[in-house]
Image (cartoon, grey):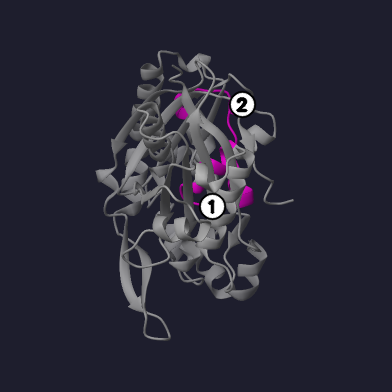
Amino acid sequence: MNHSVGIRSLAFSLPSIKRTNDYYREKYPELIAEAEQKSLARLFSLAGSIPSNEFDSEMLPYLKDPFRGTIDRWVLSSDESSLMLQERAASDALNAAKLAPEEVDLMLVASIWPEQIGFGDAAYLARQMGLQGAAWNLDAACGVTPVALQTACALVRSREYRNVLVVISCSYSRFFDEDDTLSWFMSDGVGAFVVGSLAPNQGILGTKTIHTGDLCDIFFAEVTQDGQGSPQVHMRMGKSANKAIRETAVRQLRTCCDGAIAAAGVTIEQVDFFVFNTSTAWGASFCTRVLGIDPERVINLYPQYANIGPVITVANLYFAAQLGKIHQNDLVLIYGLGAAGTASASVMRWGNVALGPNPLS
């Protein structure tokens, strides 16, 4: 029996509004002038110290930019919802895999954050798509993409399920005010992939996952009311955020990537391509520097899409495959990191992965 399990198809969906830096320069000139006293600059700064590690050194060139290297970001319009984007990406992934909705045995959904306070999106999306199988939610913050992949592969490998649809969603714009400078480096979007059986020796070979308890206090949720009196969640930054991120990034990356490579029984030199959740403009260069790898073996979509939370990992995978940077039977490492969640890396041998339509076409 074939126990090789991994990604069969990939899809990526974006909202309709693209915002450039000029939008904020024109609308919030006073915030641009005061940027270094605002939340985004406080989150990513040296806080009066000198660079002390690879994260600091790679961040340093961006500290004179009030947008910290962000160029474009994508935002839901008033008549769009994250569920709409989820259904589009999920349908594209199924179509690419040549699967009908009734052939989906299980759907795993990770939403940052769900449409309804207190409820994940899985059941709502399953109802919207007419799925007949199981559907439940996963939560591992922005590190959830490799965790969802690990979970789906384990369930298919156990033969509990055959075809698992994974949907990763991020709608930051709904939870940050536009005049909060933190929102300037965040985007909305959805990624989806189908996990199932692959050709022998393809699919997931090794994984290493750790918790990110050290990052539990960097963001927190604040429940307020909107103009109609309905509850609304806003995300705020904790006072320890800058220090915690800078001091833990190297250890988390090395622990997970070294662990996944060892579990896969390969060496880092054998890995053909690396996909990181490039949540900052310097995320890719930071990872290549820490791991000592060739920058040509990494993709960085941050300038075009900013920080889409866990979705940026799916987007990087999608475009790496579309641009011909990943080929069938290549060894690929993916890494994801989320505050108050997980850091996780997986090594896989790439299969014959079908791609959904380019969201920019």
Query: How many callouts does the rendering have?
Result: 2
**Neighbourhood count class around disc 2 (C-alpha, 10 Å): few under 14, some 14–19, many 20 upward:** some
Identify the residue at image location x=58%, y=46%. 302
Residue 332 appears at what percent x and percent y? 52, 25
| Above/below status of 269 relative to 240 | above
Q: Amino acid at mark 2?
A: Asn
| Above/below status of 332 relative to 127 | above
Residue at the extreme bottom: 228
Q: Quadrant of the image for the N terminus?
A: top left
Q: Which residue is mark 1?
A: 190
> Helix or strand or loop: what does disc 1 sit on?
strand
Foreground of the two, 187 or 354: 354
Label 1, label 2: how far apart the Cα atoms are: 22 Å
Left or right, 51 with reference to 321: left
Residue 352 appears at what percent x and percent y? 61, 26
Please tell me which of labels 1 and 2 falls first in the chain: 1
Q: Which residue is mark 2?
A: 352
**Neighbourhood count class around disc 1 (C-alpha, 10 Å): few under 14, some 14–19, many 20 upward:** many
Foreground of the two, 129 or 108: 129
| Above/below status of 173 relative to 293 | below
On whether residue 294 falls in the magenta region, the answer is yes
Let me know if residue 138 appears in the view: yes
| Span colored in magenta | 289-317
The answer to whether marks 1 and 2 mark residues whose Cβ atoms lie closer than 8 Å is: no
